Image: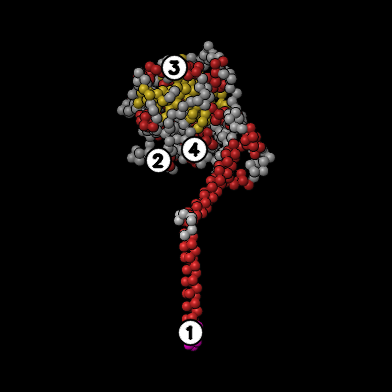
Amino acid sequence: MENEFQRSVSLRVSRRGERNNQSQQTKDVEDRFFSSGRMPQDYPMKIVWKRGFIRLVLVAGILWMLLILSVLLFHVWSCQSSITFFSGILESVETTLVNFIFAICNKDSKVFNKDSKVFIMLDTMGLVPKPQHRCPIPLADDPDTVVIPKRRTPDKIVQNLSYILEDELVNNESQLPPLFGGHQSWLQREKSFKPNSTMKVHCGFMRNGGAKMDPADIKYAKKCRFVVASGIFDGYDAPHQPSNISLRSQKLFCFLMVVDKKSLNFIKKNITVREDADGGKWVGIWRLVLLHHPPYDEPRRNGKVPKILTHRLFPQAQYSIWIDGKMELIVDPLLILERYLWRGKHSFAIARHKHHQSIYEEADAIKRRKRYARPLIDLHMKIYRYEGMEPWSSKKMVVSDVPEGAVIIREHTALNNLFSCLWFNEVNLFTPRDQLSFGYVVYRLGGLFNFFMFPNCEYNSLFVLHAHNREHSSVIEWVKSLDEFKGNSSGLRESRGGLGLWNPYPGNLDSVHLPPVARPSKAG
């Protein structure tokens, strides 16, 4: 035992001696190294450079991978974009690069083909931008060569149109407050759908009903024969400056942006607003027209005033082009009038909806997207169904019952003004979803109202669509039952709009069943 203990101790001593010798040797090497003629900083600098080089390689590798990914995404995007994108850069990009881009975009390419694993993987990750639904527009070559018609379209059906400005209330309604759209009765509504040579109809702007313009804006609008109109309410959007506007159109057209007080304050805080000597407020080419006392509780319904009743706000206008506030116009307005009105001798043009042709399909999509109270949408559609509105079919004389209402191109004839009034009255009586009422008014006029409904892909070639400043949300959008509207204590009822949803309907709707919907789109 003692021998084993002595051997163990001697081994530990010998190992400690070896470690001491190695430490001494290392110290001697370091002494010799620093005693040489080199700078004392060389040794630690080598360690720093070694670590820095490794980091540099790692960073360069990451940047290289990001560069490859960026180029890859650019090529995928360029393959999905319109070929016209490249026409603008051919002069500024080297020929070899352009040829390379076109080569990889070739339909036979194994890397960027839509069936390739790379494309499918990027598409699954949401990194492939969806191609916009656009197509070429057969526009005239030059706005300066467009010939403006000397004569307006003659008024053959309706020759004298006037508007009701005072409410005709019965005794038990004499204490009701004045409304912008008036208290239109069901009988008055029915009579308005029977065109005569002389007519007097409800058309908003009832006395003391709201929506007043400043005197300076009224004076300015009196000189406007050609109008590009838009509107922003509740601060949802910001003005977008039109592009490709010729000098001729800049002199010919008035660009009028109708806003409420909240939107005007938002614009002033975020965009430079110029004020002229007459008190007019300008953002670039747009003149801001302030609408005092918005007539409705719902901002969406307020937006229908300048959109549908453009002829009432600007009565001297002979032609108007309406665009939603989220749109940026990229085509000269004179070319738009020539393409959609004068060339085909039309007086009213609107784009067809991208997905839906039947108002019942559109109503179903609105409910799925929760864009308005579901039971009120159903009640709206039941009234139309009771009054004979059939789902769209190829037997109808129109290509679709559902428009894309973000752009409306019209000549302000008496019949077109009547149609706009009737369309607005439906929005005033029922829901603010105006695409549900358009086809119904066309149906009620019995083929007397002719219009040009152009392809949706052309609509997308007229504008650039921008996102709203914020998403619109209202508690009424989440209502599931009519019981939630009982009484006024809930605060869900609109006090100044949707009167047809609250006044007893003269017909029996209990037996009305809405037609089945095929759901051609994935809305919602």
Which badge, 2 or 4, is on the more N-terminal residue?
Answer: 4
Residue carrying label 4: 366
Residue 4 in magenta stretch? yes
The residue closer to the viewer here, 517 or 188, is: 517
Q: Which residue is mark 3?
A: 224
**Foreground mark, 4 or 3?**
3
Q: Position of residue 495 (x, y in %)?
A: 36, 33
Q: Which residues are magenta?
A: 1-7
Identify the mark nearer the N-term, 1 or 4.
1
Q: Secondary structure at mark 3?
A: loop
The amino acid type, in three-letter code, at marker 3 is Cys
Residue 367 higher or lower than 450, as above or below: below
Outermost residue on the right side: it is 108
Mostly what secondary structure, the magenta segment?
helix
Q: Is residue 344 left or right of residue 233?
A: right
Lower position in the chain sequence, tag 4 or tag 3: 3
Total labels drawn: 4
Mark 1 or mark 3, which has the lower sequence index?
Answer: 1
